[in-house]
Amino acid sequence: MDILGTLSGLVRDSGFAGFLAGGGWKNLIMIAVAFVLLYLGIHKKFEPLLLVGIAFGTLLTNIPGGALYHMPMWDAYVYNAPYDAANEIVLYNTAEERPMTEDEYVAALLATVDGADVDALARTYVAKMAPLYGEMDVDTMAAEQKNTCAALELIDEGALQAPDVIEELSFTDIIHHGGLLDILYIGVKAGLYPCLIFIGVGAMTDFGPLIARPSSMILGAAAQLGVFLAFFGAIASGLFNGPQAASIGIIGGADGPTAIYLTGLLAPGLLGPIAIAAYSYMALIPLIQPPIMRALTTKKEREVKMEQARTVSKKEKIIFPIVVATFVILLIPSTAPLIGSLMFGNLLRETGCTERLSDTAQNSLMNIVTLFLGISVGATTVAERFLSLQTIAIVVLGLVAFALSTTGGLLVGKIMYVVTGGKVNPLIGSAGVSAVPMAARVSQVEGQKANPSNFLLMHAMGPNVAGVIGSAIAAGFLLQVFG
Amino acid sequence: MKIFPDAILTAVLGYGVVFVGLVLLMAVIVVMGKVMTARKAAAPAATAPAPAASPAPAAAAPEAPGSAGKIALHNVSDRDAALIMAIVADKLGVPINQLRFKSIKEVK
């Protein structure tokens, strides 16, 4: 046994050596980012159920050599491009969105071997091949076909694998060639996890306040303002194309599963930063919204005590999800996966005869899917993609989207205050940004600060759950346009 | 340069679709609510329901040791009542067995 060779192989293949390879420092930065996210999730309790999973996925995917997640393979799937499974190279130029030329592919192959002396390798290969092909000018041949000859020599030496190109990747190929997180990520790419989470969300949501006060729907719609303004902002920045801008805009819907669903389908390359931005801002709602609420409303408006809404019968609560699912899906068919799942979960809750299923959807199913979703979304935060100007732009645009959605809800809340002769407290408008029930709680807290005998929570729950439906419709529209 | 008009159009159209969708849904729910309320009102007065207040126990069963007595629940389920009592005890920082709840009523 060649002990020295084995030891040097171990050192060469270790993750520590990976940090020293080209671009390895980016992985170190991402591991530091993962630690920060873990700190925010565990110590600061920022949406810990999801953020801890995302952070750990970020950690795992950025440890060199772990091979748990293969970004090039998913690029090949998304762009329907050939994939060299042996060397983990997608034969597609993702920056320019066109198929790779042969020269680019060979260059990409060579780039996977650190410190390769291309000239020397080419000369060695041509010299080796000369006896087979008769008279051959080694120098001319090595110069003309330099990269190809060098790559072939590296394959001969075993430093590169012989190409194993799959023309059209399927999920079966991904299971065969992928790592653990690639397999879990199939659930995101297929849109499975967000929909399963929506079943759980539906089972946990009481739509009673919305049924009792249907005008809450208007506030839920108004609070989607940030979605479309951030979409426009992303296009105007010149950094994003239409599908990417749509995925960034949906951050303003303040609805994690919807954002992940839409991004997974339209701009999977941006899934990591968008999911992190969406969940971080949702956790920061108690900090983001109050200054805007106080700036846009007067003390008199905030003091308004709203009348108790009517009691909603059990029969209405059962009919509601059936009517909403049928109506909204007929209106915008592309909302079917999200609205269908949400309303199915809610029906399980309200029927009164499917308590076991409702309980499973609210607890076991929700927990299992959250576990898979968090870690597989975190896996997409690969250093070479995450550390970019686009990520910074997403963080900024996400914040703008949240703030504008809050503003939209508040402004329409003010209009309703005037129209109803002061019976509606405009603070409930900000709850239209989804983020159930955090945004409604913020309305309650701000209302109580202005008037300690004010109880806005149930009134704010109406726009809050209307916002969930609103953001699903917004996502359906964007999917229809860019999908 | 065509990209900006397209983006503006998409944004305006999208916001409009969300508004129209939810306003139509609001109309559907309003109609549903009216139908439900009308049917409730049309129910024959002869079959008037029993009093909402919880009925007094006919033959009172012996109370558990340490019990502070009965609680009157008005349109509140046992589960919700238990939750409310637990929340009140938690907020007050007083053990629940040191508190006495006389009645819990849903405010309409």
Image (cartoon, rainbow, N blue to C red):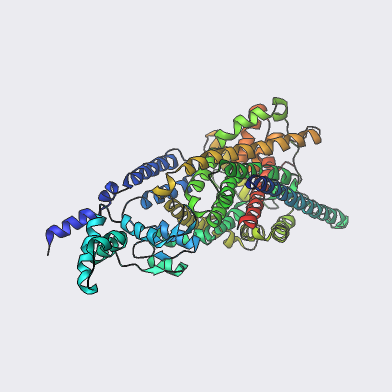
Nearer to me, B93 or A105: A105
Q: Quadrant of the N terminus of chain A?
A: bottom left
Residue B81, given in percent of the width and then of the height, sits at 62, 46
Residue A338, given in percent of the width and then of the height, sits at 61, 57
How many numbered marks are there? 0
Left or right, residue A259 beside residue A176? right
Left or right, residue A140 beside residue B50? left
Nearer to me, A301 or A451: A301
Nearer to me, A98 or A469: A98
Tell me if residue B100 can be seen: no
Residue at the location (42% across, 56% down)? A71
Residue B58, given in percent of the width and then of the height, sits at 71, 52
Residue at the location (73% across, 33% down)? A305
Q: Quadrant of the C terminus of chain A?
A: bottom right
Nearer to me, A154 or A286: A154
Residue at the location (12% across, 60% down)? A3
Residue A452, given in percent of the width and then of the height, sits at 66, 28
Tell me if residue A121 can be seen: yes
